[in-house]
Image (tube, rainbow, N blue to C red):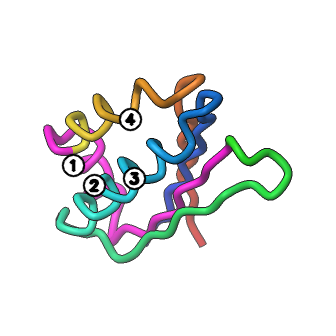
Amino acid sequence: MIYVLVERHIAEGMESTYDVVAQQALEAATRAPGFINGETLEDLQRTNHRYLLSKWRSLHDWKQWYYSDARHETLNQLSPTLADFEKITLLKK
């Protein structure tokens, strides 16, 4: 199993729009092969920073999702709400 931590900085005033679209993106990921679970987190000190922590069966499964059309479609919807590029960190136990 692997964990994927995605850090995103939300453009000022776009937090509520981001939260709606990000929830839809997470729901799409739940249908991806190898997805185990995921949760979204908000930075207490920097409220325009969001984190998505997801667990995947394998790196291969994550990469399948990462390069999928479904993920690219959700990123196209998220991009206008972001102040910067997302940062992805791959982790293992």
Give the Cα distance between marks 2 and 4.
Answer: 24 Å
Depth check: 63 or 82 in front?
A: 82
Question: In the image, which residues are magenta?
Answer: 49-70
Residue on which disc 2 sits: 60
Q: Residue at x 34, y 76 (%)?
A: 36
Secondary-structure class at tag 1 = helix
Give the Cα distance between marks 4 and 1.
Answer: 19 Å
Q: Earlier in the sequence, mark 4 or mark 1?
A: 1
Q: Position of residue 76 (x, y in %)?
A: 28, 29
Above or below 31: residue 13: above
Secondary-structure class at tag 4 = helix
Residue on which disc 1 sits: 64
Amino acid bearing label 3: Val
Q: Is residue 84 left or right of residue 66?
A: right
Above or below 22: residue 78: above
Depth check: 62 or 21 in front?
A: 21
Give the Cα distance between marks 2 and 1.
Answer: 6 Å
Give the Cα distance between marks 3 and 1.
Answer: 24 Å
Whether residue 72 appears in magenta in the rendering, the answer is no
Give the Cα distance between marks 3 and 4.
Answer: 10 Å
Q: Give residue 69's quadrant in the image.
A: top left
Residue on which disc 4 sits: 78
Crowd tier of the residue under label 3, counting other residues whose Cα lies within 10 Å: few below 14, some 14–19, many 20 or above:
few
